[in-house]
């Protein structure tokens, strides 16, 4: 088989490896997050808010690489299950401020061991995972240029 055909084999595609790894990670996260009553995209939003509470929708979107049109339904659902509050900014009514509710703050305690479960499931040591994270961050940066 010539090189061009080898390049087009599914098993040689970086994009497929990343995609299929993402699917496996999502399945693992689903198992871990179902008892908390949230989805993986909701978990990502909660991670942002646990780092810094009381931020705008656009700030959350920037951190998660999401457009507000994608983020708004997630935030509305989090509000409906009483994990966050959405209020208009007093300085600029076009901006919506997201804050954690008491229930949202308490959920952090339930989620605290999720990273350890991911590490254990990976069968990798922390150094290996941090190296992968750094490589993927660099790849994302290079591709997004």
Image: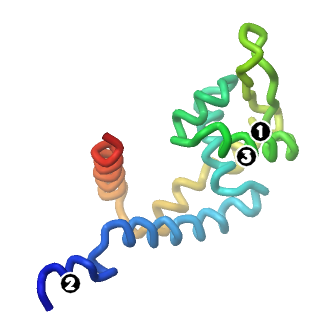
User: SS for tag 3?
Assistant: helix
Residue 112 x %, y %:
62, 48
Between 64 and 92, the one nearer to me in the picture: 92
Residue in the image at 72% along x and 12% along y: 92
Mark 2, mark 3: which one is toward the viewer?
2
Residue 31 x %, y %:
66, 68
| Rendered image: mark on residue 133 | none
Q: Is residue 56 left or right of residue 36?
A: left
CA separation in Å, label 1 and label 2? 51 Å
Mark 3, mark 1: which one is toward the viewer?
3
| Rendered image: mark on residue 5 | 2
Residue 46 x %, y %:
66, 41
User: SS for tag 2?
Assistant: helix
Q: In this view, does 138 lie to the left or right of 27?
A: left
Check whether the beta carbons of the residues at disc 3 and disc 1 lie within 8 A of each other: no
Residue where numbered disc 1 is placed: 104
Label 3: few (<14), some (14–19) or many (≥20) C-alpha neighbours in 10 Å: some
Residue 104 x %, y %:
77, 39
Residue where numbered disc 3 is placed: 74
Vertical side of 9 occupied by 142: above or below: above
CA separation in Å, label 2 and label 3? 42 Å
Mark 1, mark 2: which one is toward the viewer?
2
Residue in the image at 66% along x and 30% along y: 57
Residue in the image at 64% along x and 42% along y: 45
């Amino acid at each position: 088989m010539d090189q061009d055909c080898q390049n087009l084999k599914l098993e040689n595609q970086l994009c497929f490896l990343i995609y299929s790894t993402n699917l496996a990670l999502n399945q693992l996260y689903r198992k871990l997050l179902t008892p908390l009553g949230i989805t993986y995209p909701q978990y990502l939003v909660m991670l942002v808010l646990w780092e810094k509470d009381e931020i705008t929708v656009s700030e959350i979107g920037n951190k998660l690489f999401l457009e507000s049109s994608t983020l708004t339904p997630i935030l509305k659902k989090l509000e409906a299950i009483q994990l966050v509050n959405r209020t208009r900014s007093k300085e600029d009514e076009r901006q919506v401020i997201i804050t954690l509710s008491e229930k949202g703050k308490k959920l952090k305690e339930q989620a605290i061991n999720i990273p350890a479960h991911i590490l254990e499931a990976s069968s990798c040591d922390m150094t290996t995972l941090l190296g992968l994270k750094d490589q993927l961050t660099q790849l994302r940066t290079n591709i997004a240029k």
